[in-house]
Image (cartoon, rainbow, N blue to C red):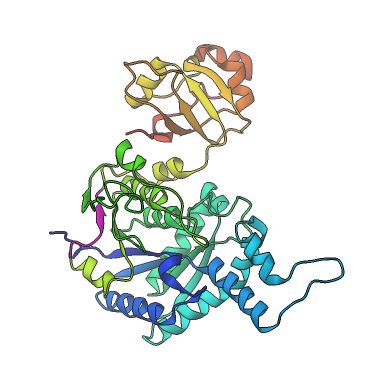
């Protein structure tokens, strides 16, 4: 039987498809979730919500406006609002506009529902840029920690209206965001509520004989191949993004449960240990800094030889002599990808890694393949003679 009785810090991610109804928020459902979370707070637990639904709500609001006040084509031939939404729901600018409209509506519902139980909530909007920058990453973590100490429930969402990346590419309907948050605050368990009952051994939308998998200890290539594609009209997530989230949570030593959010008292039942959905268990636990390195977008790539790969697996520094080539433009202090020779040899035991580099891309190109003794002659006596130290290197394919 699962045992989450000692879980004190919990992240609950709620997907678009179960949070909304007829392109608007499902008020009754939000109230039920607020009731379950308020019950957890009374047991001296802390809860963070990652809430989707803003884009869908904004889209529904515009469609409603189109129905109430029809807008005819102008002499310039501009389509009305409903046609814009119908044709542009996949367009980044339109989705940004919908997010800006829907976000305050979504937060109003959460605030109203939690106030019914005497609980204060806080809105926290996040972009990928915030998480990739070490300083803003730490500031965000400190902010969430303070809110939790004040017994406030932080409600997080991607700041879609100002995000510079294509919406969904950074977090995947907040699946990845929820795992990053769980990782960031050292959560004990991540509960991912979706319209998906569980992880199956094959795509249940295509195969009638697909069977649910109750427990996962390792996300294999086979599991990823069976994950299927993206989500629905307003939701960019799918099983693939949920598996990616499970990997992130696992590296933080955080357990994750994927379950159908429409099940009665689903949060209470999961914490009580009932075996519903799929439970993912961690394989390793990394330090907070290592998790930040692992989950940050790489600014470039350093291709290294087999000897260098063996060295970093044995917790040794990466030296310029092991660098084969450099791709991209980046400064010292950037997070970069470390790739083995192509194609990898049969003896390769480490496939990829990420690291914080001590040298810029231009410096690395000048030093590739050279011994450490040559670095100071080329760059000067004050420069370090290593590309990255062991504390700043994280193996990806563990």
- Is 348 left or right of 361, judged from the image as shown? left
- Name the residue located 44 percent from the left edge and 45 percent from the top edge: 292
Q: Position of residue 19 (x, y in %)?
A: 43, 71
Q: Can residue 382 be seen?
A: no
- Is 362 left or right of 309, judged from the image as shown? right
Residue closer to the observer: 258 or 308? 258
* Residue 194 location, quadrant: bottom left
- Is 188 left or right of 173, judged from the image as shown? left
**Does the magenta segment cover residue 276?**
yes
- Name the residue located 45 percent from the left edge and 76 percent from the top edge: 121
Q: What stretch is highlighted in magenta?
A: 274-281
- Name the residue located 50 percent from the left edge and 12 percent from the top edge: 371
Residue closer to the observer: 211 or 172? 211
- Is 186 left or right of 72, judged from the image as shown? left
Residue closer to the observer: 184 or 333? 184
* Residue 190 location, quadrant: bottom left
**Does the magenta segment cover residue 125?**
no
Q: Which residue lies furthest to the left in this view?
A: 1
Q: Main secondary structure of the magenta part?
A: loop
Q: Which residue lies furthest to the right in this view?
A: 75
Residue closer to the observer: 84 or 163? 84
Q: Can residue 144 be seen?
A: yes
Q: Position of residue 347 (x, y in %)?
A: 31, 16
Q: Position of residue 172 (x, y in %)?
A: 48, 53
Does residue 72 sit above or below 256 in this rendering? below
Quadrant (top left, top right, bottom left, bottom right) of the C terminus: top left
């Amino acid at each position: 039987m699962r045992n989450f009785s000692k879980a004190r810090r919990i992240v609950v991610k709620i997907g678009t498809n179960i949070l909304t109804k007829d392109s608007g928020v499902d008020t009754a459902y939000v109230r039920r979730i607020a009731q379950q979370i308020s019950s957890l707070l009374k047991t001296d637990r802390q809860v963070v919500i990652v809430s989707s639904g803003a884009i869908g709500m904004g889209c529904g609001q515009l469609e409603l406006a189109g129905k109430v006040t029809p807008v005819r084509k102008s002499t310039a031939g501009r389509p009305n609002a409903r046609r814009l939404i119908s044709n542009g729901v996949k367009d980044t600018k339109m989705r940004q506009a919908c997010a800006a409209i829907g976000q305050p509506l979504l937060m109003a519902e959460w605030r109203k529902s939690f106030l019914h139980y005497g609980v204060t909530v806080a809105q926290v909007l996040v972009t990928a840029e915030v998480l990739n920058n070490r300083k803003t990453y730490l500031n965000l973590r400190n902010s969430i920690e303070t809110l939790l100490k004040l017994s406030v429930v932080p409600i997080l969402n991607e700041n879609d209206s100002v995000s510079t990346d294509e919406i969904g590419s950074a977090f995947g309907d907040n699946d990845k965001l929820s795992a990053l948050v769980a990782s960031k605050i050292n959560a004990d368990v991540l509960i991912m509520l979706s319209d998906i009952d569980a992880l199956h051994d094959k795509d249940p939308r295509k195969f009638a004989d697909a069977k649910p998998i109750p427990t996962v200890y390792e996300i294999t290539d086979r599991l990823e191949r069976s994950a299927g594609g993206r989500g629905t009209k307003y939701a960019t997530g799918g099983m693939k993004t949920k598996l990616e989230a499970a990997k992130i949570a696992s590296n933080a030593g955080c357990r994750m449960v994927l379950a159908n959010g429409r099940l009665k008292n689903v949060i209470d039942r999961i914490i009580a240990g009932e075996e519903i959905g799929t439970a993912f268990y961690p394989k390793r636990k990394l330090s907070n800094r290592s998790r930040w390195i692992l989950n940050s977008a790489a600014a470039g790539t350093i291709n290294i030889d087999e000897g260098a790969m063996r060295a970093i697996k044995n917790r040794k520094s990466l030296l310029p002599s092991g660098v084969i080539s450099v791709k991209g433009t980046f400064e010292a202090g950037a997070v970069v990808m470390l790739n083995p020779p192509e194609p990898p040899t049969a003896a390769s035991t480490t496939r990829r890694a990420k690291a914080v580099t001590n040298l810029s891309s231009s410096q690395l190109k000048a030093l590739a393949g050279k011994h450490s003794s040559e670095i100071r002659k080329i760059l000067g006596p004050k420069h370090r003679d290593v590309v990255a130290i062991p504390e700043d290197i994280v193996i990806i394919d563990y």
